[in-house]
Image (cartoon, rainbow, N blue to C red):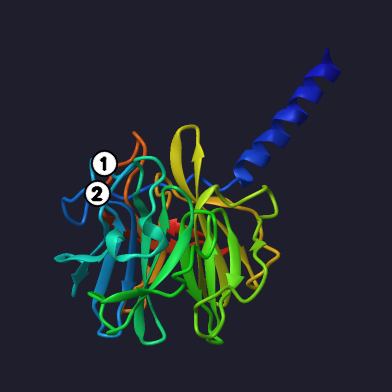
Amino acid sequence: MIRVMILFATILATASATWAAEPEKPKLPPLKPLFDYPLRDTSVCVGGDGLYYLTGTTGHPTWWKTNEGIRVWRSADRKTWEPLGLVWKIDDGTWQKQKHGKNRALWAPEIHYVKGTFWLTLCMNFGGTGLLKSTSGKAEGPYVDVHPKGPLTDNIDASLFADDDGKVYFVWQNGMIARMNDEMTELAEPPRHLKPSNHSQVGFEGAFLTKINKQYYLVCAEFIKDDYHCMIAQADSIYGPYGPRYLAIPHGGHNMLFKDKEGQWWTTFFGNDSHSPFRERPGMLRIDFNAAGQVRPML
């Protein structure tokens, strides 16, 4: 009996030490939408004019099956947002105009300011990702399809990442990546799948990549027990190896990170599960970093 009690005490002590070593699940601060408009997959960037630009999936209530294209908003202070309207229509596209049965919806557009102009990544709900370029240098467009003969990939959830050396990468789905050519019209190399050290993928969709303090942060969305979380893994080089994935922003799945004009880092938010502070509205919150450089909501 004494041996059993000693064994049990040893197991309990070991388990307690393990639990204590695990990082505490991050918490969200009080959050409200930026404005009241149905929107998913919020994306924000800072333009060359120092203003903030926002986009995301629109077209409620039929956005799962049909919508018009891409809408953009602009703000000087991240508080008051001016609608710029529908800056690109699916009907003005090329391969995007096809239908899969009755479905033709554009999902998860992102807005990026790279090489002196705006770019919009997109995916269609029948499959396929693409890239649009503003020919005016303005977020309002007009936009042209850089790859009009067909999608750049056959998957979903496209994004862009511009590294410090000027190379630009196309990122999509669950951590797929390929460098683009200098003209940004084609993938210049075979795709790779970036994986964390502790799982087969960082998340199953919503891939986004950025660089903070010389580290690469691969952001993806993942359902865990019906909650749609933002998961992240970090690496010292763009192709890895990446460390373990971790829960960074609870209920913050399909988001992206951006740095404001003052040099502070933020995450976007939209709310996709029943435990989220709000549902399907554009949002953002400040983020902080722990001792390991891991992303945490700033409380």
Q: Secondary structure at mark 1?
A: loop
Tell me residue 23's x, y (percent). Answer: 56, 48
Q: Is residue 131 above or below residue 40?
A: below
Which three-letter amino acid code belongs to the residue tagged 2? Gly
Evaluate if marks 2 and 1 touch, with contact meaning CB atoms under 8 Å apart: yes
Residue 59, which numbered label? Answer: 2
Which three-letter amino acid code belongs to the residue tagged 1? Thr
Q: Is residue 32 above or below residue 52?
A: above
Residue 62, which numbered label? Answer: 1
Residue at x-position 45% and y-position 33%: 226
Where does the N terminus fall, quadrant-wise? top right
Residue 134 in view (yes/no): yes
Q: Is residue 93 left or right of residue 141?
A: right
Please tell me in which quadrant of the rendered image residue 167 appears. bottom right
Please tell me in which quadrant of the rendered image residue 267 appears. bottom left
Residue at x-position 56% and y-position 77%: 180
Q: Residue furthest right?
A: 3
Q: Secondary structure at mark 2?
A: loop
